[in-house]
Image: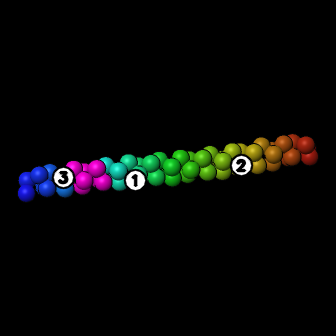
């Protein structure tokens, strides 16, 4: 009975660790993608601002 309990605990622990590992890898993936998207948006906004200021300088 004790051996079975130890085996169950080992299985639960390994599943738990696998789940945590999977969860963290997903979390890192999602946060990395959102960081990339945010930086792309910032770069696009900066380019638009630079282009606008360049256009207004050209007109004057």
Residue at coordinates 21% horizontally, 50% vertically from top-left?
A: 10
Read off the residue under disc 3.
7
Q: Which residues are magenta?
A: 10-16
In primary-sequence order, the first of circles 2 and 3 is 3
Asked if residue 57 lies left or right of residue 20, the reply is right
Residue drawn at (66%, 48%), measured in percent from left and top? Answer: 40
Q: Nearer the viewer, residue 7 or 27?
A: 7
Query: Earlier along the polypeptide chain: callout 1 or callout 2?
Result: 1
Q: Mark 1 or mark 3: which comes first in sequence?
A: 3
Q: Residues within 10 Å of mark 2 (few under 14, many from 20)?
A: few
Q: Is residue 14 magenta?
A: yes
Looking at the picture, tell me which residue is in the foreground, 37 or 28. 28
Give coordinates of residue 48: x percent, y percent. Answer: 76, 49
How many numbered discs sit on the rendered protein?
Answer: 3
Q: Is residue 49 visible?
A: no
Measure how far apart labels 1 and 3 are at the Cα level.
24 Å
């Amino acid at each position: 009975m004790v051996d079975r309990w130890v085996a169950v605990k080992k299985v639960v622990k390994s599943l738990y660790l696998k789940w945590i590992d999977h969860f963290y890898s997903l979390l890192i993936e999602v946060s990395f993608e959102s960081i990339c998207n945010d930086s792309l948006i910032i770069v696009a906004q900066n380019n638009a601002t630079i282009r606008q200021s360049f256009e207004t300088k050209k007109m004057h």
